Amino acid sequence: MSAPGEEQEFDFDFLFEFNQSDDLGGGGREHYNYASSNLTTSLPVGMVNSSLPAPCHGLQSCNPAISIIPSTSHSSGYGGNNDSGASGYYLSPNMRPNGIPALESPRIEITPYLGMHQSNNQFFHDADIEEAIPNSKRVPATATLNLPNVDAYRDPTCLSPASSLSSRSCNSEASSFESNYSYPYTSPQTSPWQSPCVSPKTTDAEEGYQRGMVACTLLTSPRHSPSTSPRTSVTEENWLGAHNSRPSSPCNKRKYSLNGRQASYSPHHSPTLSPQGSPRVSVTDETWLGNTNQYTSSAIVAAINALTTDSTIDLNDGIPIKSRKTAIDHTPSLALKMEPAGDDLGTTSPAADLTPEEFSGFQHIRKGNFCDQYLSVPQHPYQWAKPKNMPPTSYMSPTLPALDWQLPSHSGPYELRLEVQPKSHHRAHYETEGSRGAVKASAGGHPIVQLHGYLESEPLTVQLFIGTADDRLLRPHAFYQVHRITGKTVSTTSHETILSNTKVLEIPLLPENNMRAIIDCAGILKLRNSDIELRKGETDIGRKNTRVRLVFRVHIPQPNGRTLSLQVSSNPIECSQRSAQELPLVEKQSIDSFPVIGGKKMVLSGHNFLQDSKVMFVEKAPDGHHVWEMEAKTDKEMFKPNTLVVEIPSFRNPRITSPVQVNFYVCNGKRKRSQFQIFTYLPANVPIIKTEPSDDYEPAQTCGPLNQGLSPLSKPYYSQQIVMPPDPGSCLVAGFTSYQQRNTVMSSSPTSSPKLHDLSPSAYSKCIMNPGHSQLGLQQPPGGIPTLQEVPRSIVVHPSSPDQSSHIMLQPQVSQHLSSSCSLGYQQTLYPNSPSSPVPSVTQDSTYLQSCSPTRSSVMGQQQHQPPKVQRNDPPTNQPLSLPELHEDSNHNLTPIPVTIKREPEELDQLYLDDVNEIIRNDLSCTNV
DNA sequence: TATCTGGAAATATCA
DNA sequence: CTTGATATTTCCAGA
């Protein structure tokens, strides 16, 4: 403990420094100016300073919030999670979890505050600002968010390790990166550092973009532009941090490792992390479960907090601090640029920053809870510096939806689509390495994003950041940052900014290019696990958390002055050299559903398949336990490194009356398993197969088009979904409702149904529960839907938590689903994350809100309500379009009424022909099982 | 020369 | 506490 305290102190110092820097930030202000045009104005100006400040500012005010946080009792709710809980509060705001992280290290705390403040402030104020700003397309709208709620959602779980972490790390990095620009959105904070550090490099082109983009962001920053060079600078910074390297790591790692596992206790972390990597689903599952519960309570608390205090949000931002290098590097820079942020922050943040004392207080509190887990980590003075960055984050939030908010991919006439998906593998580079280039498309070339339905003549900007690819809600990845690539080979201009500790690449979307952008300027930077984990706020574990997604966002100005924010995420990208070389990866499956009889050959497309690869089908109980496991026969003759032909095993219960979702994965050995893929068993009679075709054929590409495209199969759904959902105004105020509607719509259209709502608790819980799923699920479910599906899988219910959490969480999820259904989001949404990060979801929702923002609160309510419905309705994860009926089965395969063979559709007939025998087999197998 | 990469050694962490 | 298996991070070297 003492140690922590010490650290805290340090932090404070740093903080102060930061603040000062912020003040200095006068320069920073300039940055704001940029932003000003759009973003800035919205946020900052009025909002930020005045409004935000007020709340936040006063740290005091903030403090209260802070205090709250502690009180949050997260702990109580979360128990160990408490931390998270606290964080959650913080998080809830924009900050996410990250903010929470603040726990241990001073930095964190600091950041959070800032962030919190900002975020909170932003939200509230934003609306106001927006009105004023109307012009700024982006900014304005964003404002609307109602953070409070959001916060609640995220809460604890959300904490956002990722975000915060990433941000932190990012920050440091960022500083190097970019810098600067970030202002626009966010915050000054970011910029400050960045700029300072930055320097350098801006590319002309970039500048140009920025300018062009300007509208969008204002990035301005030509000056900063220099910053562009980020990497280098970053590296350097990093070097400084050099310390960074390992020293810290050890401690950190261990800790988190603990976290991860223990995580179960502390929901946040573990859930995600563990799941992914490890095969040991069971463990994870458990964890998840635990988490869910926690979430619930935490979520609630968070929500309350949010409501009560805006400031809390800010806290989140502060959280991230971490990066040693960064800190140092940034610090200097901060002073310079901070100003802008500083203003916002400064006024706000400074205060917000919290006095050291305050911080310490928080820290202590947290520490009490979290600290134990995290505290151990020795902090490096350097690192502390980063905290400063935090502020920026907050800024961002004000205007635009926080990065951890789940947003729809389409709304009304608009649809943001990822026309070309990135390759499933991309080796990220460390700061100690040179760039490893831009993310490429599987078929060569680069990912392509396009905004459909936008007929205006004004160019927009697409934001790109690295998001998580786990079961939980989509959020900035704590261990990976987008890396701006420049050079002769890069045709797309881009500009880096930092939002909430997360590096964001801004790329112009020009009408002359049909609002289409080729993403050849985005690389992926890997931050050392030790650096990030150290952060107090961080809940996520870096180990085996090597999967990411590219997340694209566009903010479309609306006539009413609001801004419509759409988001699409890519298929998961494996960033680990080793994992990419050894872990089997299923990119596509020719069939996503088949009668229980089984027997049909399913072609899996992917990577790293071995002749002796095994394909295991698994049915999980709500609690994550494997109710049924069956090794599918593989066709060794047909084997190829990229293709695996498996015979669908008959389901254990041939009598299911409704579709049952199960999972399957490819296993190359002990710890070499692919993520869980989703497969649905249909009642013997049902003629469902239809969907298959599309799936089969659709390659990753399909996915691409849709957004997620995780799985081919999913795509179809997506398309459907997409079409269906589009609710024009939905995004806006109505936001939530719209979502609901969408959801319903979606569900219906898809087929499945209805039950998207199921997402709710159970789903969440499930998601959470099943660590493994998460990834798999995500992927599998091809579109957003997939997620849903996943949920179903897990199905189950975790009773307890769901409800409460559900309110908060669910909503988010729901919304997400809805939205996501449209776009990428789903995965995220659905996820379990919600549990973990209800808040995030909330935030996301808020995005919609943005337009609606004012109503957010109302919205929130709506969402909440809805969610519940959903939950109840469709616990089953089925929601995913795919399987309407599934739940039932899944939940209780048992019963199905004696098969109703009556209807045998044509397809069925065929199936039967082939499978009659199989059916018999199945029966046998079932018995065996 | 500066990058971009692929590979793999050196470390760390886990079991 | 040691050891083997894994996972992460740092280095090297070729293109």
Image: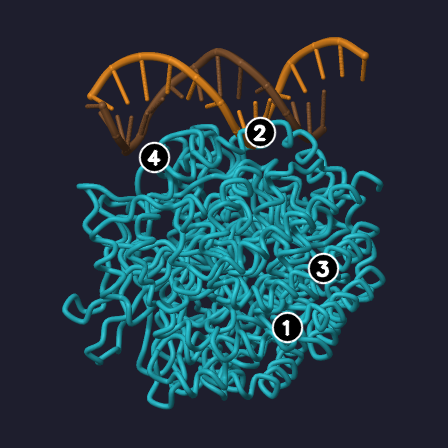
Chain colours: A cyan, B brown, C orange
The residue at the point 68 percent across, 77 percent down is A872
Q: Looking at the image, is mark 4 or mark 2 nearer the viewer? A: 2
Q: Which mark is residue A243?
A: 2
Q: CA distance from mark 3 to mark 1?
A: 35 Å
Q: CA distance from mark 3 to mark 2?
A: 27 Å
Residues behind callouts 1 and 4 on a single chain: yes
Q: Which mark is residue A355?
A: 3
Q: Position of residue A465 (x, y in %)?
A: 42, 55
**Is residue A452 at all visible to an observer of this figure?**
yes
The residue carrying pointer 1 sits among few (fewer than 14), some (14 to 19) or many (20 or more) residues within 10 Å by Cα, namely: many
Q: Which mark is residue A810?
A: 1
Residue sitting nearer the eye, A509 or A561 = A561
Upstream in sequence: badge 4 or badge 2: 2
Question: The disc labelled 4 sits on which kind of residue?
Answer: Arg
Q: Are marks 3 and 2 in contact (CB under 8 Å)?
A: no
Q: CA distance from mark 2 to mark 1?
A: 42 Å
Upstream in sequence: badge 3 or badge 2: 2
The chain containing the residue under callout 4 comes to A
